[in-house]
Amino acid sequence: MGRKRNDAASRRKASAEAKYDQLTDLNDKIFQLSTQIPSAKDLESSCCSIWELTEQVRSLQTPADPTGTRSRESRLRAFMRWSTENGAKCDKVDLALFEGLGVGVQATQRIEPHEEFMSIPRSMMLTADTELSSIGELLRTDPIASQMPNIALSLHLLSERFKGSGSYWKPYLDVLPETYDTPLYFPPNEIALLKGSPTYEQSIHMQRNVARQYAYFWSLFINKRRGQYPVMAKNFTYDLYRWAVSTVMTRQNYIRISGSSVQAVEDDSMGHLTLIPLWDMCNHRQGEMLTDYDEAENKCHCYADGAYEPGNQVYICYGFRPNSDFFVHSGFVYPENPNNVVQLKLGLAKSDSLVALRKKTLTELGFGSEDIQVFHLKSGDEVLPDNLLTFLRVFHASEAALEEMMASKDPSKAIRKDNEQKSWSYLKVRCELLLRSYCSTLNDCNSQQLNAQHVTMIKQLVNEEKSIFYHMIKLCDDQLSASEEPL
């Protein structure tokens, strides 16, 4: 009997060692591949290779257990109890499931416009507090985690999840989504549908960056610091890291320390990156941003953007962001978003004999020194950025015309009729070329073979971007017709 037990133990040990060797090999390949910056023509193959490697890793790693074993409704009730017991003011709202949106905030009593319907104390918020975190030393000293607050918060979130019932935030963790609709969950055949959209490259780069981060921290926890962080070494997987990154990316906010508002900002020196339980269950609606942070009370206060009757879903505004941003970083597309933009990148030809004079002219007119200028074409009637036509006039101007522009320094002034026609013609052709670069099979693809929600999001995003180009082409046609008149 003892010999059989020893044989079984030996087989388990050998199996674990073989799996470790496989994972080590795969993670080394992921790290090497994801540190290489692919050329434009290699983007798709790079995306496929990294996805294939991470899928192999996932097949070898133990799937994550759900954060809550009880029904979703019971977990939501437990979370609301936890919120009120820990100081949240939310007596006029509750959590509910909304079709197509998942969990959201629902009014239980009438709420008046600008009435405060929720406040969250700082003590409930989840931040990468290095003094309190069980991996605080790592968050302070690691060259990546210490410099990137979003990664630090993602790792801290995982460390809290691994505590199980020992985590103060257990009720909050239990109601977070188990998966997301960010591009990190899009396989290559879905990513390919984004071709032509600026989000195509953004999504591939995001997948590559997160794969590299995962491979780096897996090696750190499993090999370099295994004895120092045994819980992380035991539980850290690609699936869970992707989940943590998506949780932070879709819900993060900076609390401004010197100001009075809570909103996503890029400068982390202005405050602390944080997750705000309950408040982050509100879904987005375009409108006023009505959330403030009171430093004296150490509370986040949220006010209604309109009147709500019992049963209505209560929304907040996530900011004036285009759908490309919502798609990549929040995992949704907002219908008829008035803030939609699409990028147009233009640069001067290095072979142009007048390139030095053109650069000098652009500098005099307030342009930066970058080789590539990025313009944002807008939706609606204001499709043309203020400085785009100025750039195009410089781009097509003769030497004499450039001298005239330098002398006048009036970028709104049309210099010559032929220059004006060349500028509008070039812009029209450029927009037509960009339209042709979009995936031609998107509207005909069989969504039954893909994630239907992902395909719907991509179609909405791409069609809105293309509509901006169509609008710009019409504007070009109108201007070309008008330019036939004498200046």
Image: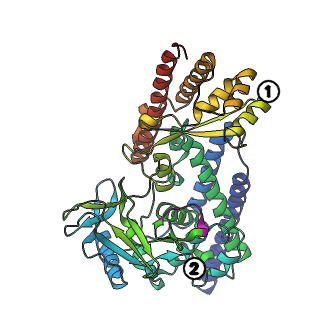
Up the image or down, 236 lies above or below 465; here it is below
Q: Position of residue 285 (x, y in %)?
A: 35, 54
Mark 1 or 2, closer to the camera: 1
Callout 2: 10 Å neighbours few (<14), some, many (20+)?
some
Q: Which residue range is magenta in the image?
A: 263-269
Residue behind mark 2: 129
Residue behind mark 1: 351
Callout 1: 10 Å neighbours few (<14), some, many (20+)?
few
The reply, left or right, for residue 364 in relation to residue 274 is right
Q: In the image, what residue occupies the spot 46% across and 76% down? A: 125
Q: Find numbered disc 2 in the image and state the secondary structure of the residue it sits on.
A: loop
Q: Which mark is residue 311?
A: none
Amino acid type, label 2: Asp
* Residue 134 quadrant: bottom right
Amino acid type, label 1: Ser
Of 110 and 438, the residue lying toward us? 110
